[in-house]
Amino acid sequence: MIGILVVILFSLTILLFLILTANAIHFYKKRYREISETIDGVFFDCGFLFATHRLMMWGHYCLFPKRAQRDNVLPVFENLSNPVRRQLKLHYLGLLTCCFLMIFSYLLSKYLLPGE
């Protein structure tokens, strides 16, 4: 029973990660230039990997306004449209959820599955 749960959790984690990757690619292609210009004042593109790191950072600022205020960027993130803020938060929380699911499925398989 636990083995099936571990496989299901692991499969859901991989599926969620693939969906989040597709979402990040879509966001990168559709809105990255506009949002980068809004936040930084200038468009600056060093590729998708760098952009996803920035998406995580921006999602962090959208979720935690006190942190954004401490870094003096709160007015910029308050002026972003709601769909953009929602997508940044979704990306941030989704990747954290993937990490927690992966760790949880590892712990289940390590400590609750019958060993050799």
Image (cartoon, rainbow, N blue to C red):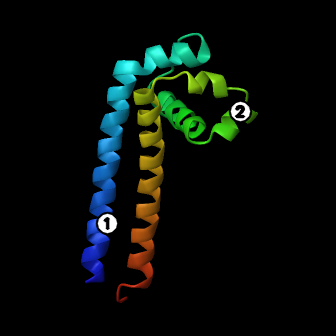
Q: CA distance from mark 2 to mark 1?
A: 37 Å
Can residue 29 be seen here?
Answer: yes
Residue sitting at x 41%, y 62%: 102
Can residue 44 be seen here?
Answer: no
Asked which quadrant contains residue 115, the reply is bottom left
Residue sitting at x 58%, y 26%: 77
Percent coordinates x, y for residue 30 in the rendering: 34, 20
Q: Which mark is residue 9?
A: 1
**77 in relation to 112, above or below:** above
Percent coordinates x, y for residue 31 in the rendering: 40, 20
Asked which quadrant contains residue 2, the reply is bottom left
Residue of label 2:
69
Q: Is residue 87 left or right of residue 62?
A: left
Q: Is residue 44 left or right of residue 67?
A: left
Q: Amino acid at mark 1?
A: Leu
**100 in relation to 6, above or below:** above
Asked which quadrant contains residue 42, the reply is top right
> Can you tell which of label 2 and label 1 is closer to the viewer?
2
Disc count in the image? Answer: 2
Percent coordinates x, y for residue 22 in the rendering: 30, 36
Secondary structure at badge 1 equals helix
Q: Amino acid at mark 2?
A: Gln
Residue sitting at x 44%, y 69%: 104
For the residue pair 22 and 86, the one nearer the viewer reads as 86
Q: How many residues crowd around disc 1 within 10 Å: few (fewer than 14), some, or many (20 or more)? A: some
**49 in relation to 95, above or below:** above
